Amino acid sequence: MSTKVNESFSAFLDGEATELDIQRMLKAMEKEPSVVSHWHDLSKVQAAIQGDPVLDQPQTLTLTPEQETASQPPRKRWRLRVFQGGIAAAVAALVMTSAGLQLQVASNDQSAVPVIAVQNQTTEQVQLLTQQQYEAQQQLERFLREHAEQAAFTTGHVVVPAPLQWVETE
Amino acid sequence: MFRVVFVLALMLFPVLGQAMEWQQLEEMRQAVQQQNYRGEFLHRRGDQTSVYSIVHRFEDGQGTELLKQQDGDMIEILRHDDKVICYFPAGSESAANHGIPAAPFSQVSQLALKQIASNYHAHSLGQAIVAGLKTNIIELTSDEWRFSQKLWLEVDTRLLLQSEIMDARGQVLEQFRYTRIELGADIGDQELVSRLSDQQGVMQQVNTKTAQPKPISSGLHTKMSWAPEGFNLVSAQQQMNATGWIDKRTYSDGLASYSVFAEMVPEDEDSKQSAMAKMGATLAFMTHNNGLAITIVGEIPDATARQVAKKLQMEDF
């Protein structure tokens, strides 16, 4: 796994990930699914460095039928999903759920120390959602590339790849 | 009789009066492809900036060019005639998903000057210095369906040293500018070799420029009932992907273009949602309409993309 991917994940944990970082993480996840458990470890290290108590407790997450229905990613409109909060939300969901980080506040504890609880459960729903977003993102990138290359030959427009700025979702 | 001739002359005057500017456009294209030069240019889209170094040699009727990204993925592109080799340093392989970087007007084999002249007005805005060289400034303006452009052409060679694409409010969406340029340079073979070509872990991608296929006239599942005046169909094809067919059309007015991608969506996936993203002057508009998932990508204003999307529908078979 490249250092760049880890740097991207670190930026993600710091809330400073760019679209490029997110894309790099998604690619790494596709190529090497085990990377998630490595990030899991990295996130624990980061939590420890920040002084947060880390509680690594493998749990089995069982959803009630109602929760399952509510969390089922709908097949509908996935083509547009790539625009809706983008890939960042998908990775956030994946990392939070499958690497299993949960920030909890012990309400019965006077000091109210934040506790990082770790779950090793990977939900199929989140994977499916992420996969759909990834496919939509890939398709959009292909459209952009095809257009850019055609435009260079037709109108002479410059080809300089840059991140897309999301301006609107309706 | 004299009055008729006079009126006709007045009607033709705007086009005739701009002839010098149109001529400069073609000279610009030739200069970009047929001059010898080395330098460094900057490309800006909003707050995103990229810097490239370029070495270009024209010899025996063939152009050779080495383009090096000076930031980001640091990829290098070697073009020799119709062959393109792209070198991706280790860790930058994902850059292969994007278009291969190219300087403006370096890839176009012929400008559609007649079409450009009928869609744009050319104005000479005097002269200015860019990268230490004197340039003529030409402004190309048009209607609300397209953006305006400004070009800075070096006075002797007509090489493009700066260009800007602006929206209706005059806001610069995209800027290309040489920060350093040496014209008429004596360029040796060694300057046209990528330093990545013999490095370990570097991925190479080789492409060959092929002739553009003619637009297919039948077989598409959709029909377009409108295009902004002056935009002509330059490409139409059908592609297959994992979820089915995709109709792709590209329209151009000579200086700007947009591509329309459409695929059918099942009724239960239809939606009223739409979304938009921008990358400088390039827009990506995604929407659903008439049972189609439509993506429009192009160097056009929002309103143009929305109107185009509205006018796409399924073909009646």
Image (spheres, coloured by chain):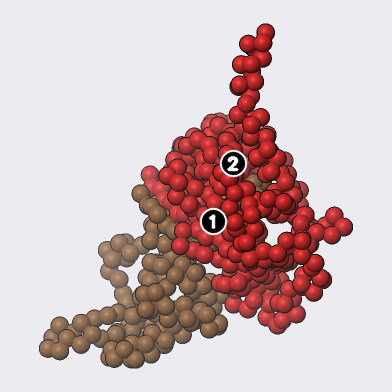
Q: Position of residue B2 (x, y in %)?
A: 67, 10
Percent position (x, y) of residue A131? 48, 65
Residue B269 spot, x, y in % from top left: 42, 48
Tell me, yes or no, whether dots 2 and 1 are on the same chain. yes
Q: Label 2's element?
A: strand
Q: Give the residue at x 33% y 87%.
A: A47
- The residue lying at 68 percent from left, 80 percent from top is B201
Q: Is residue B259 visible?
A: no
Q: Secondary structure at mark 1?
A: strand
Q: Relative to A75, does residue B222 appear above or below in the rendering?
A: above
Report which colour depicts chain B: red
- Tell me what hue chain A is rendered in: brown
Marks 2 and 1 in Cβ contact (< 8 Å): no
As shown in the figure, which amino acid type bears the numbered disc 1?
A: Gln
Residue A31 visible in the displayed image: yes
Q: Relative to residue B123, is residue A117 drawn left or right? A: left
Question: Residue B124 got which mark?
Answer: 2
Q: What amino acid type should be assigned to the residue bearing mark 2?
A: Ser
Mark 1 chain? B
Position of residue A91 relative to residue B105, above or below, is below
